[in-house]
Image (cartoon, grey):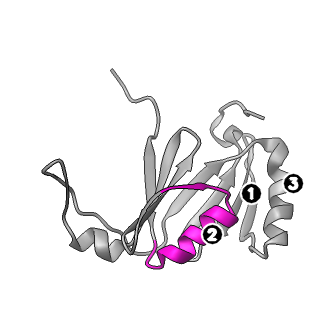
Amino acid sequence: MGVSGVLETCLYAADLAKAEAFYTSVIGLEVLARAEGRHVFFRCGTGVFLVFDPARTAAEQTYVGGRPVPVHGAHGPGHVAFSIPENDMAAWKERLARLGVEVESEVRWPRGGSSLYLRDPAGNVVELATPAIWGFPDPG
């Protein structure tokens, strides 16, 4: 018995429309579901990336099939890292520059791999990272 991977992960943003625009137009994710003023969910490879409004999810109890989903929320910048192939790094730099998205930092890790760090409209740290930063094989 064990876990096989991360199925979903989330960040929080008060302005979901700006978050949706960023994650679709800049990162290229596909919207999977949305609830106006509460959340927007994106397909991300074989997982799901969730963006919640922290005020709504921390204050409103929701139920699925009569069972409560625990309330949750966070304040302040979070972090997510999206995996990209090493040979796509230059294309990502060009895309971000063309879209006017500032790269806050670029890191070449001592044991291999590299990362680009940027921020979403809510101030969350978004990392575009090659799998080698954790010793995983590059899919590209």
Instruction: Indicate the secondary structure of the residue bearing disc 3.
Output: helix
36 left or right of 92 in image: left
- Residue 37 position in % (x across, y down): 38, 75
**Any part of residue 7 in sight:** yes
Question: Which residue: 30% across, 74% down?
Answer: 56
Foreground mark, 1 or 2, reads 2
Q: Tag on residue 90?
A: 3
Position of residue 14 relative to residue 72, above or below, is: below
- Residue 45 position in % (x across, y down): 59, 41
Q: Which residue is mark 2?
A: 22
Question: Which residue: 70% across, 38% down?
Answer: 132
42 left or right of 114 in image: left
Instruction: Indicate the secondary structure of the residue bearing disc 1.
Output: strand
Quadrant for the N terminus in the image: top left
Q: What is the three-letter code of the residue carrying label 1?
A: Val
Asked if disc 3 and disc 1 are in contact, CB closer than 8 Å, the reply is no
User: Which of pointers 3 and 1 lies earlier in the amino acid sequence?
Assistant: 3
Q: What is the three-letter code of the residue carrying label 3?
A: Ala
Counting labels gives 3
Is residue 72 on the magenta stretch? no
- Residue 43 position in % (x across, y down): 54, 49
- Indicate the quadrant where residue 98 lies: bottom right
Q: Tag on residue 107?
A: 1
Q: Residue furthest top?
A: 1
- Crowding at dot 1, Cα within 10 Å, few <14 / some 14-19 / many 20+, comes out as few
